[in-house]
Amino acid sequence: MFLTNLLGFCGDIDNIKRICDKEKIILIEDNCESLGTVYKGKKLGNFGLASSFSFYVGHHMSTIEGGAVCTNNEEIATMLRLVRAHGWDRNLDFAKQNEIRNKFNVNSTFYSRYTFYDVGYNLRPTEINAFIGNLQLKYLDEIIDKRRLNFMKMGVPIYLEKEKYFPIKYDHLDLLSNFAIPVICKTKEIRNKIVKKCEGILEIRPVVGGDITKQPFFKKYMPQYFKKMINSNARIIHEQGLYFGNNPELTNDERITILNIFLK
């Protein structure tokens, strides 16, 4: 099960993990938008067997392109290091290199640097990307705190408008490292008015994929389910939802402009 912690939020991921453990389901977290969020004393990305993070432009920290995978499973970590580097063992530590070379009887002085142990790709970050990422790490706590404060100043007042918007649950989180602020309108008409008011002022987007069954690829590859699936909650998000970005460098005047769009 590849579970997405969307826009800085999560559900009852501890219960989901318990069910997965009971049913012998492998749980992997897509934590690309929730770097730093803490749920019941544990940061998201630590509940599954592995977790993915994105450092694309606009995320909590950016290397322009690229990301990371975290795991405490040594076998998976070794596989990932092989796959990201053409299938070579160059990024393994010496002990792992010796282990895999002995397993396949590879000469360490000649063939080892160009032995392909698995199907691989060139997914390693460049030196420039790595430098940018390492530089931002020391500012990450500050960035997360600014995103949290922005959410409290913008998201919370919007959700109090209960006649216009559905509330978004966040009080189960110890720390919300908000990526963007989702707004689910009570009707399509309200959503359409907000979209109109945002033109030329605020960039907005659908709530990621919305109802996946409404996407063209789903109809192409899963035609037998296209008309049968009734996803009432996902459809509301798809048809009545939007989100706007949470930039840690937003000014107070910019926050007021955004609130005026949703509250006036």
Image: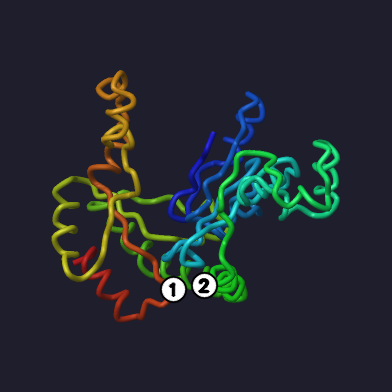
Q: Is 72 or 198 nearer to us in this picture? A: 72
Q: Is residue 185 visible?
A: yes
Against 254, residue 53 (above or below) is: above
| Rendered residue at 33%/57% (across/down) | 159
Report the number of discs: 2
Image coordinates for residue 256, horizontal then vertical, percent? 28, 75
Q: Is 171 or 83 nearer to us in this picture? A: 83
In space, the residues marked 1 and 2 are separated at their CA atoms by: 6 Å
| Side of 199 where 157 appears, left or right | right
Image coordinates for residue 137, horizontal then vertical, percent? 60, 71
Asked if the residue at tag 2 contacts the one at tag 1, i.e. Cβ–Cβ closer than 8 Å, the answer is: yes
| Rendered residue at 28%/37% (across/down) | 215
Q: Is residue 141 visible?
A: no
Image coordinates for residue 242, horizontal then vertical, percent? 28, 53
Q: Residues within 10 Å of mark 1 (few under 14, many from 20)?
A: some
| Rendered residue at 81%/48% (across/down) | 96
Amino acid tagged 2: Ile
| Side of 77 where 222 appears, left or right | left
| Rendered residue at 26%/64% (across/down) | 203
Against 229, residue 234 (above or below) is: below
Q: Quadrant of residue 118?
A: top right
Classify mark 1: helix, strand or loop: loop
Q: In which quarter of the image is the C terminus?
A: bottom left
| Side of 135 where 115 appears, left or right | right
Q: In the current view of this chain or complex, which residue is farthest to the front?
A: 110
Classify mark 2: helix, strand or loop: helix
Task: Check disc 2 and report the residue beneath it.
Answer: 143
Image coordinates for residue 73, horizontal then vertical, percent? 73, 43
Task: Check disc 1 and report the residue beneath it.
Answer: 248
